[in-house]
């Protein structure tokens, strides 16, 4: 089946124009897993209501409960029905609304909060129009009527949706975004487009603060909040918002994630349609390039963007546990409701992640963060930019998320050292630092004073030097007034940075044109450097020793 036909059929199902059918069968589940670059994805099929029937998952809450649509009758039944469903790990796939709406023809559940309040839409055989609904397993159904189309719900039972305008030739015109709360509907004052059979499930979203995002007819994304009202966003469209206020939407550059203050956190190019963003900043959605089938993806904050599986067709929602609700369309098969569980690495190397030169026999520090219970970490080194690895050390997991390892650098020399840290016994919890590190003989280079430096007696002079001896490495600062023939140590201290350091010295030499400063490493690596000769003038009287800046 071509990608165009697949998408057309899915949109027909999504928009409630497909009927489905009745007869019940046992829900079946299957699971598998696949490895991304830095994440493992587990796949679970939610089963069907009838043998061979289609299902589609649309939304998921933080308990892992899923809602969507499912065929209730065989597809060759002229009165086949499609019903909303609720799936839980305990009870499996269960149809909803059948008791509340005896003449239900076709329906879909599009949202669920952590209290299992479910929202959606349905048609009846009587053909009186498209109804919105709110349903709960213990309280039953509240019919939201023919004029309010629910889209998203938060844990406060606030529902973002569409107040439908007049129906003309199958399309709802002049529709506006609205907020439903305790039976009261509040228009948010912005037209959201002609809401009809060509639209998909999303278009609005609401977080726990009651903030709503959406897109306008004028071609910009917007944010509505109870405090500020309606605010235009620097987006062409806005699709989802998380509890941190991060918003995912489109600009001319592609899909972007905005911070609460409007700063662009990251951008992804391509024909991508985001559907949801969780509180960790993970984005789920789908894409359809002109030269490839439609596919579902997850986009992680570190920039990793991957297809969920080879047959993943649609991703509609993602919870804070990294579970994604959507659909797979197997080759020559039937649409199936799926939950993908993304287990991204909980370990991140934080140092060294900028180009550095590490001197042999100098102390250097690796640092990483880890959220897990692995008892220890394996640290490995590569001297060929990650092609091959050698064990460096195994260290225990100390209390807290921040971990460090201090290493006295050894040869052989290389320009392509990388470091990998792995949490032993925690699959997928592994990371490599971002850049190659140069391992070379330890060096120190004095940047100032220079040969043009002229300083008065008793005045401050700042010594700057570049080095590869590492941070907090012991060094000695010496001074000479006779061009280096004799030296006097004025301070022993430690470096103030990993690659550059500075010290402030109150000049205590008599006037001379042959003053020099020297920096010596005290770690036994042999690194040292001497400044160019500079001038000390007789402008004032020295009164203080060298002190660290």
Image: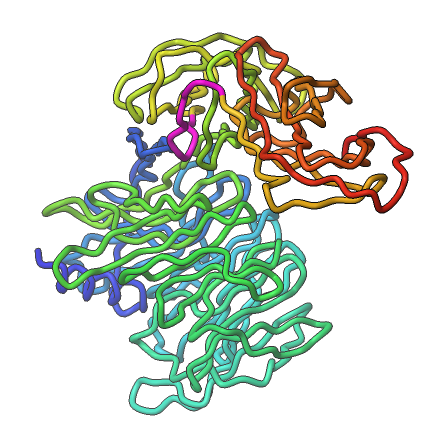
Q: Which residue is drawn at the image coordinates 81% and 30% (left, top)?
A: 547
Q: Position of residue 146 (x, y in %)?
A: 48, 79
Picture quadrant of residue 437: top left
Q: Position of residue 533 (x, y in %)?
A: 62, 35
Q: Position of residue 454 (x, y in %)?
A: 70, 45
Residue 315 as seen in the image, left or right of residue 510 = left
Q: Which residue is drawn at the image coordinates 31% and 34% (left, top)?
A: 36
Report the front residue among 20 and 226.
226
Picture quadrant of residue 3: bottom left
Report the front residue among 90 and 14.
14
Which quarter shows the C terminus?
top right
Task: Reply above or below: 276 against 340.
Answer: below
Q: Which residue is drawn at the image coordinates 40% and 51% (left, top)?
A: 284
Determine if the magenta segment contains residue 433.
Answer: yes
Scheme of image coloration: rainbow
Determine if the magenta segment contains residue 228.
Answer: no
Q: Which residue is drawn at the image coordinates 58% and 85% (left, top)?
A: 189
Task: Reply above or below: 246 against 512.
Answer: below
Residue 50 as seen in the image, left or right of residue 129 = left
Q: Which residues are magenta?
A: 431-442
Q: Position of residue 35 (x, y in %)?
A: 30, 30
Report the front residue among 358 and 286.
358
Residue 206 as seen in the image, left or right of residue 481 = left
Q: How many marks?
A: 0
Which quarter shows the N terminus?
bottom left
């Amino acid at each position: 089946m071509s990608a165009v036909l697949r998408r057309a059929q899915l949109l027909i199902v999504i928009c409630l124009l497909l009927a489905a059918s009745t007869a019940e069968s046992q829900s079946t589940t299957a699971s598998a897993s696949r490895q991304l670059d830095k994440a493992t994805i587990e796949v679970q099929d939610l089963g069907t209501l009838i043998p061979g029937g289609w299902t589609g998952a649309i939304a998921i809450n933080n308990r892992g409960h899923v809602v969507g649509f499912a065929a209730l009758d065989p597809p060759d039944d002229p009165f086949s029905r499609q019903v909303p469903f609720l799936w839980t790990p305990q009870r499996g796939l269960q149809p909803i609304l059948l008791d509340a709406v005896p003449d239900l023809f076709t329906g879909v559940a599009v949202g669920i909060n952590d209290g299992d309040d479910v929202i959606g839409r349905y048609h009846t055989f009587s053909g009186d129009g498209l109804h919105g609904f709110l349903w709960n397993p213990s309280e039953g159904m509240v019919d939201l009527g023919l004029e309010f189309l629910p889209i998203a719900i938060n844990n406060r039972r606030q529902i973002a949706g569409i107040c439908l305008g007049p129906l003309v030739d199958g399309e709802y015109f002049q529709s506006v975004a609205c907020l439903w709360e305790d039976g009261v509907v509040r228009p948010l004052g912005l037209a959201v487009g002609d809401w009809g059979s060509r639209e998909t499930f999303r278009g609005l979203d609401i977080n726990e603060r009651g903030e709503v995002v959406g897109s306008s007819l004028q071609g910009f994304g917007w944010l509505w909040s109870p405090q500020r009202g309606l605010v235009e966003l620097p987006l062409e469209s806005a699709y989802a918002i998380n509890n941190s206020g991060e918003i995912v939407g489109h600009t001319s550059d592609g899909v972007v994630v905005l911070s609460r203050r409007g700063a662009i956190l990251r951008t992804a190019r391509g024909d991508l349609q985001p559907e949801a963003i969780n509180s960790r900043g993970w984005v789920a959605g789908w894409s359809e390039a002109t030269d490839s089938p439609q596919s579902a993806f997850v986009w992680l904050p570190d920039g990793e963007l991957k297809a969920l599986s080879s047959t993943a067709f649609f991703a509609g929602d993602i919870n804070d546990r990294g579970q994604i609700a959507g659909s797979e369309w197997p080759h020559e098969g039937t649409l199936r409701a799926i939950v993908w569980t993304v287990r991204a690495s909980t370990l991140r190397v934080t140092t060294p992640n900028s180009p550095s030169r590490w001197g042999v026999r100098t102390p250097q520090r690796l640092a990483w963060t880890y959220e897990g219970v692995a008892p220890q970490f394996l640290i490995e080194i590569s001297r060929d930019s990650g092609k091959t690895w050698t064990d460096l050390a195994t260290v225990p997991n100390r209390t807290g998320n921040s971990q460090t390892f201090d290493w006295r650098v050894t040869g052989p020399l290389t320009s392509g050292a990388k470091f990998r840290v792995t949490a032993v016994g925690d699959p997928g919890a592994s990371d490599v630092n971002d850049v190659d590190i140069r391992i070379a003989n330890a060096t120190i280079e004095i940047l100032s004073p220079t040969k043009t430096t002229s300083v008065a007696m008793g005045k401050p002079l700042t010594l700057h030097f570049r080095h590869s001896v590492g941070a907090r490495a012991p060094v000695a600062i010496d001074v000479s007034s006779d061009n280096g023939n004799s030296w006097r140590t004025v301070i022993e201290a430690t470096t103030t940075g990993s690659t550059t350091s500075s010290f402030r010295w109150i000049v205590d030499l008599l006037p001379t044109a042959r003053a020099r400063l020297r920096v010596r490493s005290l770690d036994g690596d042999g690194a040292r450097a001497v400044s160019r000769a500079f001038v000390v003038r007789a402008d004032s009287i020295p009164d203080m020793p060298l002190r660290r800046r």
